[in-house]
Image: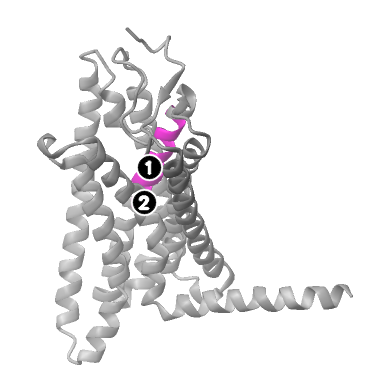
């Protein structure tokens, strides 16, 4: 029998049993993590340094990149360390912190994607009111609401989850600490409180989903009313990156948490968790930069400036 007072650490799920595969996973995750760091950092720096990108759309994109950096930094470094050092252990406090920060960034991410759908709706359906509805103060308030929603949700779920008595061991069937796996260790009917919180969270998530769908229905209707095909393509291309990111985020997250128990397995849960926790933060910078010429130009100027500076530094020092 275990209880909260006797558990000092949890055992995370190992990716492989052999040392060679563990090292392979380490290098694979390191490559993904570095790509996510580089891509999101380039977007953040480019938007911060170029005044042409100081618009509501890019302001929200900067916040999205910050949240993506936070979410992938919460899970992958610990998984890489465990693979490198051939261990599964994570302390009780670190596990609680990991669950809190992952929820914080993921919920904030989803709320911000909802705000970005509203931004695209106003830009396309009500362009004359864009400056009024999405002024600097309104943008700051909406971004703060997304971050605050993530913080409040993470605080409530983390406090409630780790207040439950745990008596079914300390082995977590996942490569990071998440609520469903911690609840499996609970032996008390008090887990119904957490289920209640999850139901409320699902209702809020569904509300955001409906808002995004309604926004894009209005956007599609407005785009189809544009007479020229070139004009429709130009306007709709500004929505494609956001629509792709939303689809990736919602589809992987929904499958992870709403799939029937009959199709659940340790391997499948592991793969799905990688899809919704690792893949979106890594590919979001690529999705947003592929069809956005302004962002590509800003990133290219940034890289060119760094290159010229690196060339001039040795000569100036000489």
Left or right of 151: which side holds 127?
left
- Hey, which quadrant is residue 248 in on the image? bottom left
Label 2 and label 1: CA atoms lie apart by 8 Å
Nearest the viewer among 314 and 65 is 314
In the rendered image, the quadrant that contains the N terminus is: top left
- Depth order, front residue of 276/301: 276
User: In the image, which residues are magenta?
Assistant: 96-109
Q: Residue at coordinates 55% horizontally, 74% vertically from top-left?
A: 51
Q: Kindly identify which residue carries mark 1.
A: 150
| x then y, percent, for residue 21 | 41, 44
Asked whether disc 2 touches disc 1, contact meaning CB atoms under 8 Å apart, the reply is: yes
> Which is nearer the eye, 58 or 23?
23
- Does 169 appear above or below 178? above
Assign the magenta stretch its main secondary structure. helix
Label 1 CA crowd tier, 10 Å (few <14, some 14–19, many 20+): many
Q: Earlier in the sequence, mark 2 or mark 1?
A: 2
Residue 48 picture location, percent across and down: 56, 66
- Asked whether residue 17 is drawn in magenta, I would say no
Q: Which residue is mark 2?
A: 109
Residue 101 part of the magenta-drawn span: yes
Image spot of residue 259 (x, y percent): 15, 42
Q: Nearer the viewer, residue 70 or 198?
A: 70
Secondary structure of the residue carrying tag 1 is helix
Residue 245 quadrant: bottom left
Q: Quadrant of the C terminus?
A: bottom right
């Amino acid at each position: 029998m275990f209880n909260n007072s006797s558990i000092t650490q949890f055992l995370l799920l190992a990716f492989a049993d052999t040392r060679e595969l563990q090292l392979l996973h380490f290098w694979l995750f390191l490559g993904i993590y570095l790509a996510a760091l580089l891509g999101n950092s380039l977007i953040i720096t480019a938007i911060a340094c170029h005044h042409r990108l100081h618009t509501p759309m890019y302001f929200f994109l900067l916040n999205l990149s910050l949240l993506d950096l936070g979410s992938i930094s919460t899970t992958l470094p610990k998984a890489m360390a465990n693979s490198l050092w051939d261990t599964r252990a994570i302390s009780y406090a670190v596990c609680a912190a990991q669950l809190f920060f992952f929820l914080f960034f993921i919920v904030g991410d989803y709320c911000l994607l909802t705000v970005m759908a509203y931004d695209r709706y106003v830009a396309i359906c009500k362009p004359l009111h864009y400056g009024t509805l999405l002024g600097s103060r309104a943008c700051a308030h909406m971004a703060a609401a997304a971050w605050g929603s993530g913080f409040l949700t993470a605080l409530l779920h983390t406090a409630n989850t780790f207040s439950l008595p745990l008596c079914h061991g300390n082995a977590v069937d996942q490569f990071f600490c998440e609520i469903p796996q911690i609840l499996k260790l609970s032996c008390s009917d008090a887990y119904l409180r957490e289920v209640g919180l999850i139901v409320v969270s699902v209702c809020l998530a569904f509300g955001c989903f409906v808002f995004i769908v309604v926004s894009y229905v209005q956007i599609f209707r407005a785009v189809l009313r544009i007479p020229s095909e070139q004009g429709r393509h130009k306007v709709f291309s500004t929505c494609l990156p956001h629509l792709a990111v939303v689809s990736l985020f919602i589809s992987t997250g929904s499958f992870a948490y709403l799939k029937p128990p009959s199709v659940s397995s340790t391997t499948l849960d592991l793969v799905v968790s990688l899809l919704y926790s690792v893949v979106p933060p890594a590919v979001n910078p690529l999705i947003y930069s592929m069809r956005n010429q302004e962002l590509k130009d800003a990133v290219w100027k940034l890289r060119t400036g760094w290159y010229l500076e690196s060339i001039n530094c040795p000569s100036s020092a000489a």
